[in-house]
Image (tube, rainbow, N blue to C red):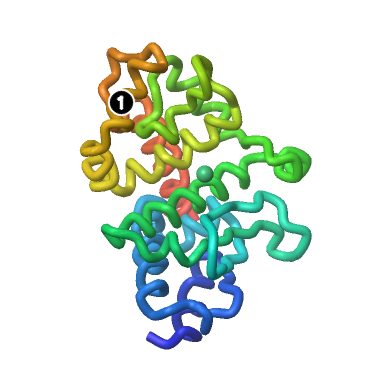
């Protein structure tokens, strides 16, 4: 698939790729798979576009990934992906990273413009915190615990990791071999919740958010 065709396909999902020819062929395939997996959970390309809105997608040669919930140019939201993220072992870890940033965009779409400018979480993240209660997030990074308490900023990562763990169960299996991923619940005083893993309340919450979007698409 040519870079141009790839960019046109992603446009259907609301993604506006900056300089498509800068993306290598395997990187394009990786983004395509990540977007495809997310869209399937949201009832297709239209569902994804309704949930996340339009997003500018940029590759940079160095660094990590990030979402700019407000970007002062159309389409007003921007995701940046560093090339090192797209070349990991196993390769699908790059897909997990892309989905993670897309999940941030999904939440940002439920925040008002002032909150987005200030980088504050949206309705999805605020309601997640209320719904899951004391249940920790799926991964250490997305545990929502910054020190002993859950903070709203950390909860944004908890949401992004919840979506990643839901769409990529292999991510959780992969993390299970890492000692730091199994000791944090005890350190956070939540030793009764073995991790990594997607807790039942987190699963119900993310499934409900996906279900809402699927319903929107079927209702037309
Ligand atoms: Zn994040």
Residue 64 location, x and y as percent? 52, 56
Residue 61 location, x and y as percent? 54, 70
Graded by Cα atoms within 10 Å as few (under 14), some (14 to 19) or many (20 or more), the crowding at tag 1 reads few
- Is residue 170 shown above or below 49? above
Left or right for 200, reference 160: left
Q: Give SS at disc 1.
A: helix
Q: Quadrant of residue 121?
A: top right
Q: Quadrant of residue 119?
A: top right
Q: Quadrant of residue 45?
A: bottom left
Q: Is mark 1 within 8 Å of ligand 1?
A: no
Looking at the image, which residue is at 39% across and 12% down?
189
Residue 34 location, x and y as percent? 38, 60
Q: How many marks?
A: 1
Residue 167 location, x and y as percent? 33, 48
Looking at the image, which residue is at 43% across and 60% down?
85
Tag 1 residue:
200
Left or right for 163, reference 130: left
């Amino acid at each position: 698939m040519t870079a141009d065709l790839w960019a046109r396909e992603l446009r259907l999902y609301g993604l506006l790729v900056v300089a498509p020819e800068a993306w290598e062929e395997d990187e394009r395939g990786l983004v395509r798979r990540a977007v495809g997996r997310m869209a399937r959970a949201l009832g297709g390309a239209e569902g994804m576009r309704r949930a996340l809105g339009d997003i500018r997608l940029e590759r940079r040669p160095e660094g990590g990934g990030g979402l700019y919930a407000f970007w002062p140019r159309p389409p007003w939201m921007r995701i940046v992906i560093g090339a090192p993220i797209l070349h990991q072992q196993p390769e699908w870890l790059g897909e997990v990273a892309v989905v993670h940033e897309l999940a941030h965009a999904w939440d940002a779409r439920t925040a008002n413009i002032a909150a987005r400018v200030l980088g504050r979480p949206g309705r999805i993240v605020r309601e997640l915190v209320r719904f899951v209660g004391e249940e920790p997030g799926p991964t250490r990074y997305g545990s929502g615990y910054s020190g002993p308490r859950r903070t709203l900023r950390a909860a944004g990562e908890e949401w992004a990791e919840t979506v990643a763990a839901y769409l990529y169960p292999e991510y959780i299996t992969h993390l299970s071999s890492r000692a730091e991923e199994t000791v944090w619940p005890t350190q956070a005083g939540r030793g009764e919740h073995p991790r990594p893993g997607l807790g039942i309340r987190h699963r119900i919450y993310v499934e409900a958010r996906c279900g809402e979007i699927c319903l929107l698409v079927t209702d037309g």
